[in-house]
Amino acid sequence: MLYRMRHVLCGLIVGLLFSVQPPVYAQSEDETTIKSIFDERLTSGEMYELLRELCKDIGPRLSGSEGAAKAVDWGKQVMEAYGFDRVFLQEVMVPHWERGEKEQVQVVNVPEGMIELRALAIGGSVGTPAEGITAEVVIVNSLDEVDALGRDKIEGKIVFYNRAFDQTVVSTGAGYGGAVDQRGGGPSKAAEYGAAAVVIRSVSSAFDDEPHTGGLRYRDGIERIPAAALGFHSADRLTEILKESPDAKLYIRMTSQWHPDARSYNVVGEIRGSEKPDEIILVGGHLDSWDVAEGAHDDGAGCVHAISVLRTFKKLGIRPKHTIRAVLFMNEENGLRGGIKYAELAKANGEKHLIALESDAGGFSPRGFGVSADDRVIDQFRSWLSLFPRNTISYINKGGGGADIGPLRRETGTPTIGFIPDSQRMFDLHHAPTDVFENVNRRELELGAASITSLIYLIDKYGLQGMAQ
Amino acid sequence: MLYRMRHVLCGLIVGLLFSVQPPVYAQSEDETTIKSIFDERLTSGEMYELLRELCKDIGPRLSGSEGAAKAVDWGKQVMEAYGFDRVFLQEVMVPHWERGEKEQVQVVNVPEGMIELRALAIGGSVGTPAEGITAEVVIVNSLDEVDALGRDKIEGKIVFYNRAFDQTVVSTGAGYGGAVDQRGGGPSKAAEYGAAAVVIRSVSSAFDDEPHTGGLRYRDGIERIPAAALGFHSADRLTEILKESPDAKLYIRMTSQWHPDARSYNVVGEIRGSEKPDEIILVGGHLDSWDVAEGAHDDGAGCVHAISVLRTFKKLGIRPKHTIRAVLFMNEENGLRGGIKYAELAKANGEKHLIALESDAGGFSPRGFGVSADDRVIDQFRSWLSLFPRNTISYINKGGGGADIGPLRRETGTPTIGFIPDSQRMFDLHHAPTDVFENVNRRELELGAASITSLIYLIDKYGLQGMAQ
């Protein structure tokens, strides 16, 4: 785009191309407040700087690691420094798994000699024997195919789950959901028929060679076999080699291992409500991340989004009627112990949660909210849509929440909200070494914070339609 | 985010977090076609690969440069290879400006000795004398301030326009529009009062130190003085130095220069309409870019978006009723000669354009379209909104178009459409060395192509409401 003075309409055209501001009219108090929330977030850039600290000063923070412990201290200090009314920790024992040495995955017994593939152990995988595992490879596209092949074809082999992310799904969460069974359930399925190990095509929308880790779940009573995720190019390469070289084998060596559960914490900060201090509006993200990345989008973004609500209220002098609570949950990635503990304590202590929101879909440009609540609440939220600036929140979906607040909903019936940012880039980075601060855009992150803060402001002010207030 | 098999709802939750597909019901022909358009674009990734060629094999392509000439050949060859019914060039003489050697902008006469600033000549700027210019700096925030200071304060000085991009504007085009007068009109305004040169804070939403070039317009009858744009950090640094060191001066050396107009071309490809071949639906972008970057978003994205419409129609066997024409305009950035020539020829040849669409706001996730047409047409387009997948096109704004199709609208009254992608990252990169292929996301780019192709499909099928068909 250009700027040419002689075209007097140029500024107008530029404006029309990108924006179109709402017409000028007398602003309601809500419009004024929401404008001030967006202005504060976009100008201070404070949440972006907090995220920089979490990513660059602390970095990876898998449950039980030193990074996770540092992140707990960091979260507490940040919220204390902001002067929230109460900041406290909730102790929780978490699984402690370590990746160990760099994984080796190599194609062997091929004319080229040896071909190195890019791979990461799937989170929670057992290691291989010290000398590694070498075996022939059986390539499949689904768990069902393993059932169909049966023990004859599978026993002693390495099963390669090769089904790719479905690129035709516009909102990529569903693409992820459509491929991730290979990672979660593929290892035990292969072990049912005596497989030696599993490799998968990483569950990712990118076409690079970054392997993406993530969790698996071993089924009880079935042998635990090692499992690794390959980069996209590496998976392509392996597919081709298996066509051309029938004698090719795969060599895998991983030293990953489990340790005893470790002590860790959810970090909680709150501003007490002026009218209904015993009714809590929760906003959360998870503090733990996978060990291979900074967890910038997953879920550093959600942590600073949660903090931003309280921080923005305080900075703008908004006194909430309800208690607003930011929760940085521990152990979403490989156990959900923080979310389970939070719900347990909430129930034991008879705490009332009006509603709970989670941001765990990245720090991208806001698109909407998903809401699991009474239809009247959904209608109420939809009536607020015009208060959000164009090109931020444009819809309220029926159904939504987040993994960490799922136990609270199940235990106490609390309605839940999930923040929905644009999803196009999330699964390029998710659980991969590329989920770093550099891949977060300042304005997008802060717009998410402003959108969430604005929704919480409205919920606090008006309560929930049809609920006893 | 995690995947845990034991939570049977996990897939559902992931789905809800990110997407929510429309309910299943019998699909109309339009739904089926639009689904096939999106599927084709998202799976083949062909436009992303075309953009890679344009960015990596050709690179920068400022009007009159060798890169621009190569880009013309490339565009023609690509469209010929796709077998479009007709591919042709429209000759146009374009301005030819060259940056010359790397710019030098230094703070001198300070205790530190010399401090280098990151700067780029503003496009179209004259060079300095060979020995450079050294002068005191007057810092201002607006053109009005220059008027207020007057000749006494300005003469012989270097004027530093320091007003920053307004971060509070949610849709960033308006932020750009609010600062760009400093670049376009600032030099002549300062020259009115005898300034020696101008530097500006780059018109950018980023907080890095990349300088952003772009065009200026010298006013007739006023001396042409050199003008450069500083990176954000460099502008900050200069601001601080000027506070602390009143004797500081700026040294500027630039060897940029103007050459005689050069011969170049718009590249046009078309598929002939089966029912109304003489009514043209135009979709365009501009082929030229600034000289300092690959012009990936500005406007390589628009070029491949334009090509994608014809390519996707052909690949899916959609036979248009109207003639669909892709135009890769030359010289949008510093002259608009291609757009002017196109309109001239359309008028001279009595061509009828049903409507013209331009994509020149980047290859980011689709948000909406802006439409300058009769209200009935806008209502008609709005009635199609539910056909676009969730998280792509969600609104039709009144008012929109693009610089290159502006002359066509003015000359022939053709209605115009501007494609509106998410704008948060555009002005971080726009006109800067960072506008490169690596900063384009494959899925976002292809979703833009699919959205535009889908709209053109609907317009071709149904015509424009209230227009004589």
Image (tube, coloured by chain):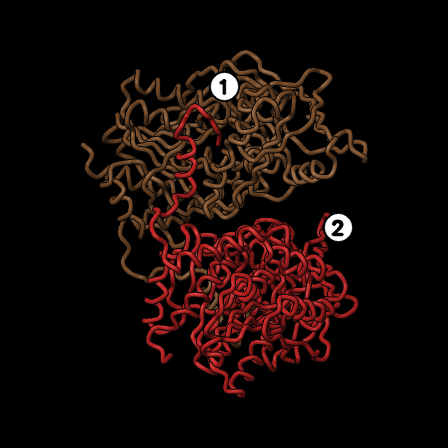
Chain colours: A brown, B red
Position of B263 relative to A265 (above/below):
below
At which x and y percent is residue A436? 59, 37
Give me the disc on residue B416. Answer: none
- Secondary structure of the residue carrying tag 1 is loop
Could you say which quadrant of the image residue A242 lies in? top right
What residue is at 46 percent from the left and 26 percent from the top?
B4
- Between residue B158 and residue B340, name the one nearer to us: B340
The answer to whether residue B217 of the structure is visible from this angle is no
- Secondary structure of the residue carrying tag 2 is strand
Badge 1: how crowded within 10 Å, few (<14), some, or many (20+)? some
Left or right? Give the position of B336 relative to A387.
right
Could you say which quadrant of the image residue B217 lies in? bottom right
Q: Amino acid at mark 1?
A: Arg
What residue is at 44 percent from the left and 26 percent from the top?
A329
Look at the image and tell me in which quarter the C terminus of chain A lies.
top left
Could you say which quadrant of the image residue B103 lies in? bottom right
Label 2 marks a residue whose chain is B
**Real-space Cα separation, disc 2 to disc 1, in angstroms:** 69 Å
Left or right? Give the position of B222 relative to B6.
right
The answer to whether residue B150 of the structure is visible from this angle is yes
Position of A190 relative to B376 (above/below):
above
Give me the disc on residue B113. Answer: 2
